[in-house]
Every structure is written in C-alpha cells, then in structure tokens.
Image (cartoon, helix red, strand yellow):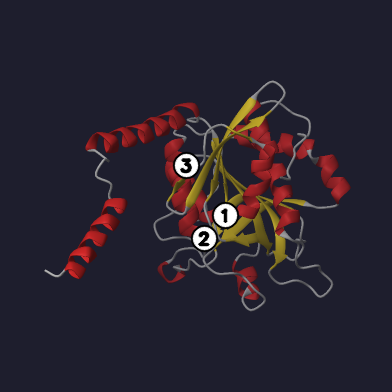
C-alpha cells in the first residue's frame, strides 16, 4: 500500500470520525430521545386545551408572535413549525399553539393534525391569514369569517355528488360548538368601532379552498358553481375536514388581500403587511372571548415586531 493511499484513507477516517463521533454512546442517544419525549410530554400536559391557530406563511405568523409571549421553545415537524405561546390578558393568559404550516391543502392538513395530537383537548382551531375575494361585493381589506367550507376543485358530480364534495364525505364542513358562536358575536361587537373607523366590511359565509388559484380565467365558472361563496384560499377546507374527522370546532378568519375577478373600478390588491395584522386581530379577539367566556373590550394588541 503506498504512503499516498494510506494518508488518503486516514483523511477519510478523520472525516468519518467528525461525522460520526465515537464518544456518542447508546446511553447518550437514549438520554437525548428521553429529553425530547419529556419536552413533548410537557407540551401536551400544559397545552392540552390550547386554541390552535394556523397560518400558511411567515408574514401571516408575524403579528401573532408580536402580540403573544413564548410559553415554550418553538419546534419543527416536517415543513411545519409550532409555537407554544400565551396571549396575556389582565387577569388571565390564553394558551395558543401557533402553527405555520406552509401553503397548500396537504401542508395545512398534516400540520393541524399534528397540532391536534399535541393539544389533545384543544378548544378548537382557527385558520388565519389572507384569502382571495370571490364574491363580487367583496373588497380588499374585508374580513371573512367562514361558516362552511368546500373544495373548489372537487368534482364527482358524475357519480351524483355535489360540486365541491369529496366522495363519501359531507357536502361541506364547518360544525362548531355554541360557545364559538357566542365568542364570535362578542368579538365582532368588541371590534365594531375599529371596523367602522377603518372602513372595512365583515362577512360571514361560505369559503372555498383548492390546489389552484382562482383567477380571471376561471372565476366565472367558480362563481357559477359556488354562487354564495365569499372567498377562496389553499388551506381552509382541508383543515375543516381534519377538524370534522376529529370532532374539533373550526373556523377561518381571513382578510382579503386580492380579488379573483375585480371590476374595473375596484382596488384588487393589498399588501400582506396590511391584511395579516387585521386577520390576527380578529382571530386573537375570538380566542380571548372563547377562553374567558366573557364579553371583553377590544384587546390592545401590539401586532408589529
């Protein structure tokens, strides 16, 4: 064996030793796994009845992080990131499990499934952030609160199902407890003055979600197929389905950032920096009303970093 070949083998051995240190014993591996398990157990114990709030993007998450305080370190599962937080009230603290899922039906569904498994007795799930305005009377900056949810691109009508219905599944999703309805009503009342001052509208009704954007090229068909739908996005219906499967209350609180088929005289886009804090304000007010089961004044929230 040549000296050059021997030194090459030695170099490879040193690299391997750096990648796989020999002083990392099975006991070390077990202890690290046990520590992770203890952290997970702590989370499940202290946040078992938390309210889960899902967003798709970091820009939609930012106002929630600014308005709440860390309860435990954030952690990652797959592409999703989880933030155990507290919303501090004068005499109470509301446990929230914030979830940044990334965009899309599958990402949202898998992330919320994980969250429900952590918060095993969660009070419910809120999906916040932005959406596209579908109904012609919707404007950018408006708030949409979902009452039922369908898929834009589910079409098994040839087999007798409704447009937007997955075969073998309900026509739509959106059941929630009466406590939620009371919390929503209280939150809307508390934020009425801010709404009137800011001149945006609040709508309640049907929301759509799918794997494709609704644009001026397909908005006519979408409006005809779902003539009462207010908005469209790429997460809410999948989350509503997961919550329905687990018998967990769900609602979406989205602020309209874009219009799918704007009229000639309509403003058709608002920055996420404007609409995300507005959605967060409504979501946090609803969460606080739900947790305290009281009619609260409008929360004074810092929604900027």
Would residue 103 be found to the left or right of residue 297 on screen? left
- Of the two numbered discs 2 and 1 on the same chain, state the one appearing first in sequence: 1
Q: Residue at x 79, y 40 (%)?
A: 191
In this view, which residue lies farthest toward the bottom? 217
Q: In this view of the protein, which residue sits in the foreground, 170 or 80?
A: 80
Q: Using the image, tell me which numbered label, if any, was put on residue 115.
A: 3
On screen, residue 23 versus residue 6, left or right, reads right
What residue sits 65% from the left and 36% below the top?
A: 68
Estimate how packed mark 1 is, as few (under 14), some (14 to 19) or many (20 or more) residues with alpha carbons within 10 Å. many
Furthest-front residue in this view: 3
CB-based contact (under 8 Å), mark 3 and mark 1: no
Residue 250 position in % (x across, y down): 55, 43
Q: CA distance from mark 3 to mark 1?
A: 14 Å
Q: Is residue 146 visible?
A: no
Q: Position of residue 32 (x, y in %)?
A: 33, 36
Apparent side of residue 34 relative to residue 285 in the rendered image (left or right): left
Give me the residue at 50% from left, 30% from top: 47
Q: Which of these two is toward me, 151 or 95?
A: 95
The residue labelled by disc 1 is 56
Which quarter of the image is occupied by the C terminus?
top right
Q: CA distance from mark 2 to mark 1?
A: 8 Å
- Asked whether the residues under the numbered discs 2 and 1 touch, taking CB atoms below 8 Å apart as contact, a structural biologist would say yes
Residue 99 shown left or right of residue 216 in the figure: left
Circle count: 3
First in sequence, mark 3 or 1: give its number.
1
Q: Which residue is mark 2?
A: 104
């Amino acid at each position: 064996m040549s000296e050059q070949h021997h030194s090459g083998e030695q170099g490879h051995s040193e690299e391997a030793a750096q990648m796989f240190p020999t002083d990392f014993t099975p006991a070390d591996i077990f202890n690290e796994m046990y520590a992770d398990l203890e952290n997970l157990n702590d989370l499940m114990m202290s946040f078992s009845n938390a309210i889960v709030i899902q967003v798709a993007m970091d820009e939609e998450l930012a106002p929630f992080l600014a308005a709440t305080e860390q309860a435990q370190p954030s952690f990652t599962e797959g592409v999703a990131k989880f933030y155990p937080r507290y919303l501090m009230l004068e005499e109470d603290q509301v446990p929230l499990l914030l979830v940044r899922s990334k965009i899309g039906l599958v990402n949202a569904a898998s992330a919320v499934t994980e969250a429900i498994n952590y918060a095993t007795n969660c009070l419910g799930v809120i999906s916040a952030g932005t959406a596209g305005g579908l109904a012609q009377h919707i404007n950018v900056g408006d708030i949409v609160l979902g009452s039922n949810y369908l898929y834009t691109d589910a079409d098994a009508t040839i087999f007798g199902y409704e447009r937007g219905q997955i075969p073998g599944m309900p026509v739509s999703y959106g059941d929630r407890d009466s406590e939620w309805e009371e919390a929503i009503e209280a939150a809307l009342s508390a934020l009425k003055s801010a709404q009137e001052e800011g001149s945006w509208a609040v709508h309640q009704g049907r929301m759509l979600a799918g794997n494709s954007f609704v644009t001026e090229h397909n908005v006519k068909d979408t409006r005809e197929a779902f003539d009462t739908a207010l908005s469209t996005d790429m997460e809410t219906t999948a989350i509503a389905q997961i919550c329905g499967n687990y018998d967990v209350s769900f609602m979406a609180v989205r602020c309209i950032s874009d219009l799918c088929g704007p009229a000639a005289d309509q403003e058709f886009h608002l920055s996420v920096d404007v609409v995300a804090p507005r959605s967060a304000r409504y979501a946090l007010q609803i969460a606080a009303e739900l947790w305290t089961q009281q009619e609260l004044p409008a929360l004074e929230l810092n929604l900027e970093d």
